[in-house]
Amino acid sequence: MKALTFKIQFYLITTIAIIMAQPITGQESNTIYYMKGVPQSYIVNPATQPRCNGFLGLPSSSPLQFHLENSGFSFGDVIYPMGDSLITFLHRNGDKDKFLNTLSPMNYTNAFLSTNLFSLGYRSGDYYYTFDFSEKVYTNVSYTDDLISFVLKGNRRGDRFDFSGTGVNLLSYFEYATGVSKVVNQRLTFGSRLKVLFGHANISMKSKDVTLLTEEDWTMKSNMTVSLNIPGLLIPIDENGEFVIDSVHFDESFDPVDAVQSTFGNPGLGLDLGIHYLLSDGVTFSASLIDLAFIRWNANPYNIKQNASFVYQGIEIDPNDTVDQAEKFLDSLSSVFSFTADANTYYAMLPLKLYAGFNYAPVKQISIGVLSKTEYFNRKFREQLTLSANFFPFNWLAATLSYSIMNNTYNNLGCGLAAKLGPFSFYFLTDNMPMHYIIDQKNNYWIPDEARTLNFRLGFNLVFGCNKEKKVFKDLPLVY
């Protein structure tokens, strides 16, 4: 019976999170928003005009960005020292309850990878034009504390587990963006960026009602939808709209040409809007709406649905046929929790971001900024707040220190540095500098145990006309 109970739990978990095994690979940096000397700061506010009259981003590093964040726990909650070794909370001497106490009712892990293949910008009078070709991958994994508790500790009679909201969302796409910013007058600057998108791959999972009640009779419910578009993936669907998970496979004849055709078969559009407004001498209000965008997935779409419930009342065991009875029960469970599918086109939205903040520059070389960021994705809101001190001591050097409240933590210190050496411009920045580490004495590993966010952005550009600014740009809050 113990083995049978394990099989039931395994099958239920698989049903609840059927695609949770997909690998994790958008989150733009907050520190870049007020940082001078970074040409690509218009990415988070298209009204921002770079300081130099022109720039050319070097391929694959203009910019390159990686971002990984987790809301539920830090590294130190998963792995921590014991003696001269490191153990995980799953170790026999680990503390599972302590780990579970770090989780919220709903938790998420986000990962974002972006690289520019080409970036170009130039000023013409009061206008500034930008062009970008980018590759972006964004993944969001959401899960409830009930799911982790069920996996780690199993169940007792009377337990109720709510797995609703658990899911995976993956967006991989190519983006072409063209933007323009205009100085309307000495107080107002407005900008916009139009984006043309082409999707590589997508997974959109929505689990509306997935619960388990373990009374004398187990009651299991599962209502979920998974939309996916994976190049080369084949899901044989019968005339009743059903399929068997074991029949899912990849097309062995799928080649790079097919991959390109598949990408152009998933078009999308996006729009960014931004504004800078000088309220008084040295005080600027700014706001932007980023990634008001969608992709139409129709190259290889599948929509998988499951809406079922099951009441487990036990199994009458025949001592002479235990294995057969167990197999019959699992077959019955598999039949009840079957999936249906279709190959209809669907739409997927990108994570929508709203920035708003104030910047105060008491002198030309120093400014202080406060920035609010709200992200909306998959019917969920996330809020972040960043304070920054920005320094511009020389025309060739800029530096930033930032502090952010994000991912339910208050220990996120960031920094940024931008330097111009002749026609070459370089910058590096991060929203979180790990300040505390644990060390594996045996292997000399350094692990940032308190960090829930790890990110960086770097870029190399060729810049032109950086020492000739029109008088209309004398108010530095409008120029970055």
Image (cartoon, grey):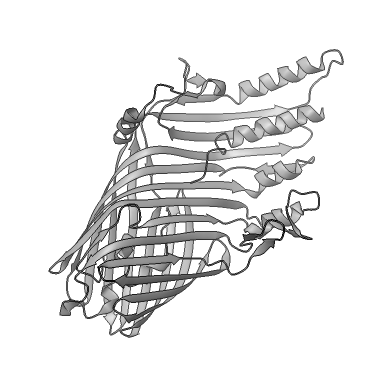
Which one is in front, 22 or 189?
Answer: 22
Q: Quadrant of the C terminus?
A: bottom left
Q: Residue at 62% across / 68% down in the picture?
A: 436
Residue under the image location 40 percent in, 75 percent down: 399
Residue furthest out toward the right:
319
- Please indicate whether residue 211 sits to the left or right of residue 181 in the image: right
Q: Residue at x 25, y 71 (%)?
A: 51
Q: Nearer the viewer, residue 306 or 418?
A: 418
User: Residue most toward the left?
Assistant: 125
Above or below: residue 248 compared with residue 216:
above
Depth check: 419 or 349 in front? 419
Establish if 387 lies above or below 203. Answer: below
- Residue extending furthest toward the top: 320
Left or right of 379 in this view: 127: left
The number of discs equals 0
At which x and y percent is residue 340? 50, 24
List x then y, in percent, for residue 283: 32, 81
Q: Residue furthest bottom?
A: 363
Q: Is residue 316 above or below residue 40?
A: above
* Residue 180 showing in the rendered view: no
Residue 316 shows up from this direction? yes
**Residue at (51, 45) in percent of width and height:** 24
The one of 328 and 418 positioned closer to us in this rendering: 418
Which of the 4 quarters of the picture holds residue 207? top right
Residue 444 drawn at (x, y percent): 66, 59
Picture coordinates of residue 427, whole percent (x, y) = 37, 66
Quarter of the N terminus within the rendering: top right
Which corner quadrant of the image does residue 79 belong to?
bottom right
